Each structure stands twice: as C-alpha cells, then as structure tokens.
Image (tube, helix red, strand yellow):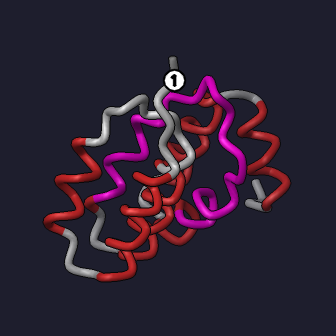
C-alpha cells in the first residue's frame, strides 16, 4: 500500500472505521500517522474522532499538532474539558495556539 493524499481521502470516504483500520495497519510509524492526520482535510459530521485524543499526549510535537488541528474540525458540542486541561500542561507555545484555535472553531449543535 502506497500512502498518498488520494489514498487517505478515499479511506476517509469509506468511513471512520476504515480510517482507524488504516492507522492500526501502519502501527507505530509516526511519520505515516502524521501524514494521514495532515491530509484528512474536511472531517464528515458523522465522525466521532475519539481516537484523535490519544495523540494529543504523544511525545512527537508534530503529531500532537496534527491531532489537535483535526480535533478542532470535530463538533464536540461543548465538551472541551480535555482541550482546556491539555492547554494547561502543554509546554510548546505553537501547540497552545492550536488548542485555542480548536476551541474557537467549536460550535454547539442544537
């Protein structure tokens, strides 16, 4: 399997389970995982994205940044506690900025 932007897009269109399966297939390769997260683009409304939160605490700052950026695309419906807590413990300023941006992109669904 060649990991391309088009392949990531096609996998995403197959659903969140297909995307999670792809991520589990690449194992611990953080560069490939980061490539997937950087190339997700628009996240469909039916994506839960709970699996993204575990990458917020990864040692790799690029992976943390990509995960947080994608979490900002989710509709968390006011459930922002994890982002607030992570903001308080994150040492890198650029990631703190991304957390604030992710919080700012949230909308409460009525």
Rendered image quadrant of residue 64: bottom left
- Residue 60 versus residue 108 in the image, above or below: below
Determine if the magenta segment contains residue 53: yes
Pointer 1: what residue? 109
- Residue 93 versus residue 21 in the image, above or below: below
Q: Nearer the viewer, residue 79 or 21?
A: 79
Rendered image quadrant of residue 18: top right
Rendered image quadrant of residue 46: top right
**Identity of the residue drawn at 68% across and 33% down:** 44
Determine if the magenta segment contains residue 9: no
Residue that extends furthest to the top in the rendered view of this protein = 110
- The boundaries of the magenta stretch are 34-56
Q: Where is residue 56 in the image (x, y as percent from the top left)?
A: 32, 57
Instruction: Locate residue 73 relative to residue 95 in the image: left or right.
Output: right
The crowd level at tag 1 (other Cα within 10 Å; few <14, some 14-19, many 20+) is: few
Residue that extends furthest to the bottom in the rendered view of this protein = 93
Instruction: Locate residue 57 relative to residue 31 in the image: left or right.
Output: left
**Identity of the residue drawn at 51% across and 17% down:** 110
- Residue 9 versus residue 59 in the image, above or below: above
Q: Nearer the viewer, residue 105 or 37?
A: 105
């Amino acid at each position: 399997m060649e990991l391309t932007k088009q392949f990531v897009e096609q996998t995403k269109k197959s659903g969140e389970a297909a995307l999670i399966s792809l991520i589990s297939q690449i194992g611990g390769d953080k560069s490939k995982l980061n490539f997937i997260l950087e190339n997700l683009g628009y996240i469909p409304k039916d994506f839960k994205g709970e699996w993204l939160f575990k990458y917020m605490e990864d040692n790799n700052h690029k992976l943390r940044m990509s995960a947080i950026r994608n979490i900002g695309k989710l509709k968390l419906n006011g459930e922002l506690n994890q982002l607030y807590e992570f903001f308080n413990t994150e040492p890198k300023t650029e990631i703190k900025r991304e957390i604030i941006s992710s919080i700012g992109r949230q909308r409460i669904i009525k």
